[in-house]
Image (cartoon, coloured by chain):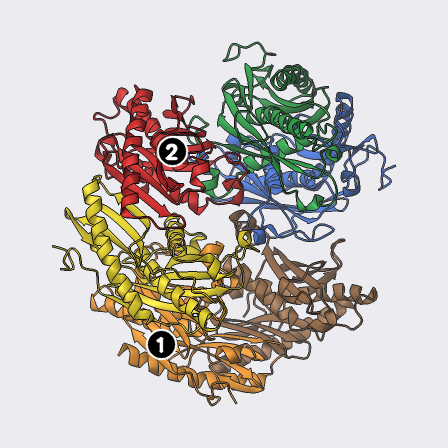
Chain colours: A green, B red, C yellow, D blue, E orange, F brown
Amino acid sequence: MRPSGRTTDTLREISIETNVTKHAEGSCLIKCGDTHVLCTASLEGRVPPWIKGSGLGWVTAEYGMLPRATTTRNRREAAAGKQSGRTQEIQRLIGRSLRAGVDRVALGERQITIDCDVIQADGGTRCASITGGWVALRLAVNKLLKAGDIKEDPLTDHVAAVSCGIYAGQPVLDLDYAEDSEAGTDANFVMTGSRGLIEIQSSAEGATFSRDEFNALLDLAEKGVDDLVAAQKAAVA
Amino acid sequence: MRPSGRTTDTLREISIETNVTKHAEGSCLIKCGDTHVLCTASLEGRVPPWIKGSGLGWVTAEYGMLPRATTTRNRREAAAGKQSGRTQEIQRLIGRSLRAGVDRVALGERQITIDCDVIQADGGTRCASITGGWVALRLAVNKLLKAGDIKEDPLTDHVAAVSCGIYAGQPVLDLDYAEDSEAGTDANFVMTGSRGLIEIQSSAEGATFSRDEFNALLDLAEKGVDDLVAAQKAAVA
Amino acid sequence: MRPSGRTTDTLREISIETNVTKHAEGSCLIKCGDTHVLCTASLEGRVPPWIKGSGLGWVTAEYGMLPRATTTRNRREAAAGKQSGRTQEIQRLIGRSLRAGVDRVALGERQITIDCDVIQADGGTRCASITGGWVALRLAVNKLLKAGDIKEDPLTDHVAAVSCGIYAGQPVLDLDYAEDSEAGTDANFVMTGSRGLIEIQSSAEGATFSRDEFNALLDLAEKGVDDLVAAQKAAVA
Amino acid sequence: MRPSGRTTDTLREISIETNVTKHAEGSCLIKCGDTHVLCTASLEGRVPPWIKGSGLGWVTAEYGMLPRATTTRNRREAAAGKQSGRTQEIQRLIGRSLRAGVDRVALGERQITIDCDVIQADGGTRCASITGGWVALRLAVNKLLKAGDIKEDPLTDHVAAVSCGIYAGQPVLDLDYAEDSEAGTDANFVMTGSRGLIEIQSSAEGATFSRDEFNALLDLAEKGVDDLVAAQKAAVA
Amino acid sequence: MRPSGRTTDTLREISIETNVTKHAEGSCLIKCGDTHVLCTASLEGRVPPWIKGSGLGWVTAEYGMLPRATTTRNRREAAAGKQSGRTQEIQRLIGRSLRAGVDRVALGERQITIDCDVIQADGGTRCASITGGWVALRLAVNKLLKAGDIKEDPLTDHVAAVSCGIYAGQPVLDLDYAEDSEAGTDANFVMTGSRGLIEIQSSAEGATFSRDEFNALLDLAEKGVDDLVAAQKAAVA
Amino acid sequence: MRPSGRTTDTLREISIETNVTKHAEGSCLIKCGDTHVLCTASLEGRVPPWIKGSGLGWVTAEYGMLPRATTTRNRREAAAGKQSGRTQEIQRLIGRSLRAGVDRVALGERQITIDCDVIQADGGTRCASITGGWVALRLAVNKLLKAGDIKEDPLTDHVAAVSCGIYAGQPVLDLDYAEDSEAGTDANFVMTGSRGLIEIQSSAEGATFSRDEFNALLDLAEKGVDDLVAAQKAAVA
């Protein structure tokens, strides 16, 4: 029995509110249960030095967590003077994941930065950031297409992510914090709308896991991503 | 004529939504027109070293702005590796202002940290942070009083803040960004609910200002703070 | 009765020794009682990126305190690896104040950096830095005028600053450290030679202050700045 | 055809030289083809604050790359003033992986730090660090057992890692740099000696990957880890 | 012929003004020609962790240069966020040199920190810092002796320093900046009042130097240190 | 009697293995007894800004120590976020020393960076770095000469270094760690193959030293450098 009463293959309630800030080219507030992430997409005038003159575009991401997004207050990274290893790992993952759904030639030599700021955390913030980040990216790209700044849609497919894990001996979909902190194995799956795999990160916590267990997690993830992609479609319609 | 069509002594529309995050002891989302600040109050287990054993409490504040709270994206301070001088100046002001309304003996030896994170900026973020920060503080202190952890209310009065300035030659209340970027003089006033002065920061931008002009700004500020305090009262009722 | 025996509207003894270092384009050692600040003006080959090509000049300031300028030794900021929030706040104030007396078109596209280093501190270091900084700036600009590098005097007026406060219930001029550490309200006023207001920073310490009290402080400040401007005139004559 | 001429399921030549430094409690120089990593295990007097008094041990890792371990010189991280996101991600992975093979109760309240320094890089440095790091850990633990400082062996199994990828459309084992820089998908697998899964990190580079492709990579990894564990056994015999 | 007209074995004019700041336990302003260094000695409540409980004292030094101590302005180290390698090298030298003249048992478990801040630079700042730093230390120790806080004088001898170099092919004493920037070899000698050698740092700039040349520099240094020690004696008398 | 049983004028056993990494333009692993330093020379595409367009070359050095090169583990400088004063002092010495043997006109406008990474430390790491660094430099320059990229050999002579000290009252050559930690005086000598002096750094530890003692150390150093230069010649033959 899961703490939330969900069945093993049920996502938390998901809501994606779009255009939540007036300045960003694209934005949404994604809520996966009690995990709330504000995602904005910013079209930037500069591109990284290594692509200057290449004609290729770039999509990158930054991640942050408000100090009191968590049950006890965490030190503000700006005050600490650096981003933690965890933060850097997450933002590298978000950027890499979103780029997997982008045709960088079609995007043209411009950079879009996705900022994912966790307003409230209850597990699964990196997955929510990817799913919500894609929506912000989609909206920003729509604006470019509408303005005629780019001709062909550079987004080749949806990109969404979900965590699965082995909780109380059973594979379950979309861990919340209560489950995550107890789970024996914790895996994040990033996929396209057509179930193409982009990224798998699976870690044993305590006991190791078997191939069979891993396959059960991946089965759950496929279902979960289908549901998330449906929510993305509804949001950007 | 103000860009927003407001009269010279009219605040922007104000809304204060309370209890917006499930983890913080007190929280609100304050909106002063298009300036939106999320304020949380965190009761912290630790106190600064210099008050250990003194029996006195401490209230402090931190301030941040999401990278795309502004019209163009600003570099994330955590990525830059330090808080800007402006950020430090603002968070020192917020902490100092709120402490002026706190009886530190009644609070007892505990620290409350107010985090003010600007979700969307349109001028006056430091004032909105103070006004909203007080609401978050009030709610957190209410929780302590209700739990019987403190006996006497340590909050001696409301604390609220507003900016005034000389725009197009005329003193006006509550500058928005369009006015702020053009204003000849820009002043921030922090006051209590009974119009006691806590902090005045007034700067010439370009031309200097006269005592008469300054007095006109202070007149406006008194009216504005009255309105803000009324909004605080409604929010925490 | 003030600890120093001064009447409420008397400045500390002021001395401004000019041309105290052989390298700087302008320099002075300002002594306001036991507060001693070395101010140098450096003509710099570079201008900030945002004014390149604008034809406008720039005046900026940096502030520092020698580790043993104070009663007990303070950690050296260079060793700590960053400037404190207080330092940044002060140097931003000095720069902003001095720029208010500069015609940036007449200055032309060049930068003058004012370094204010506190050799010995006894309260009021930021005000002494502004008053002395203006003298260093005046001397450096004189050199440019004499050399024919600029045609019109870009300094539109004197700029000087003084602190006032409510000590033992009474408004007094030019707080020394003994007073400052006890004062109920502490205000810094920056003005031009013709009493135009440039900056007001007034803070309650403990009790709030009233408009009447504030006005009494401003009355004192006007007198004090008159005396400081007279000292500046004598120094650069 | 692989650039090295290896068959798809062949590891690079592996050598593990033990006890290569006289100071460390355990050490080895692991060579996986042209990737050479010096691994040392240091028994440390201190434990992290969060396990003080718990009776539990801790194993952690740090990773570095000499500036000229690579084809062109990389900036020294100590000179840059921080570890890159990549470095932090790798060292977190190494520590997490090794801990999965440690009984922290049996280890007792002590910390062992594994330093993995890449002397020469040719792809797969994080996997070589894990495989070599385990050998250094094994040797350090042997010393503790021999000295009677711990009674029961805290190492529950071997831990080794290998990368696989899809190169020129074909799943191959143990990518070298020439392959890695061209591979469509790149996956790192960390396993125990009994093929228990500890960590999977699989990323699409360009095209996404299918479940079938992923399974082929995992098949190769199982074979590769068997060979690496055999090499570990020979080294510590 | 030296630029200053001095003979090869003549020091620059030296002046040591003592007790120049009211807060420090010991202080002096040392002028070696146009090189001016403010030296303060601070008795600190804390000792470094590694001598706690040892009963031994510690003397350490910090060095800084005001931004416009030099012909062109140098970036403020506090603003740059770190001390340069040169600064660290110099302050390590000053501390090491002064400790060589201290009986750390007689000093007792207390720390004295010598701050050497260069007000104006014209070559030889590290040597002036050592010579002046010793005077500040002497005065602070005198205060401790007078107060009866320590019984036996912990200063075993004078410590002074001078630079010599080969300028225009000739060994000369006490290089000023004009000479230093042209010198073929530059050497710093730290000695006690009885000509015991504490530190030698001699570097070729361009051509190498011979033993004979080195010996000529050392001969000059012995004379120079005799003169400096005489000036120290006069200053602290 | 020396701990190692060596006579007072005997170097530790020296071995210099060349071309130890496949990427660097020049490299060696130098072993001076139990002190092992990996030295690489990297030809860099960039030159420092101050020599751009001058036609002159540049040789610089960086130094690091693996965390467990020492008897107890030292904190990794990259993790600490900065290089220690000691590290900066050493790498400045290495660069300065090697440049003394380089004709920068003949080298042409290119930079060679020497990285010296201490794999195992037993005293004398800076001297081993200089001696080994010269070998790496020699090999990289040979490659440039062979390729015809430079016409004339820019290396004017060998550069080698050795430490001497007064151990148990007696001058001895090439201190190992056991001696170094006890030595009364510790001196490092850098010389050319023809005994030209490049750098002398001699420090009293505890007692001061006399000119006679210093001369005895220099006598030993001359012999030691002769032997080191012979080893360099054999290595690069």
Quadrant of image for the N terminus of chain C: bottom left
Q: What residue does disc 1 label? A: E158
3D distance between C-alphas at marks 2 and 1: 59 Å
Frontmost of labels 2 and 1 is 2
On the picture, is C185 further left or further right than E64? left
The image shows residue A45 at horizontal and vertical percentages of 63, 41
Front-most of residues B233 and B87: B233
Q: Chain of mark 2?
A: B
Query: The residue tagged with tag 1: helix, strand or loop?
Result: loop
Q: Image quadrant for the C terminus of chain C?
A: bottom left
Can residue C91 be seen here? The reply is: yes
Task: Estimate the x, y position of residue B236 in percent, counting from the top left.
Answer: 31, 21
| Vertical side of E35 occupied by C74: above or below | above
Q: Quadrant of residue D8?
A: top right
Please tell me in which quadrant of the rendered image residue E161 appears. Answer: bottom left
Q: Nearest the camera: C221 or E95?
A: C221
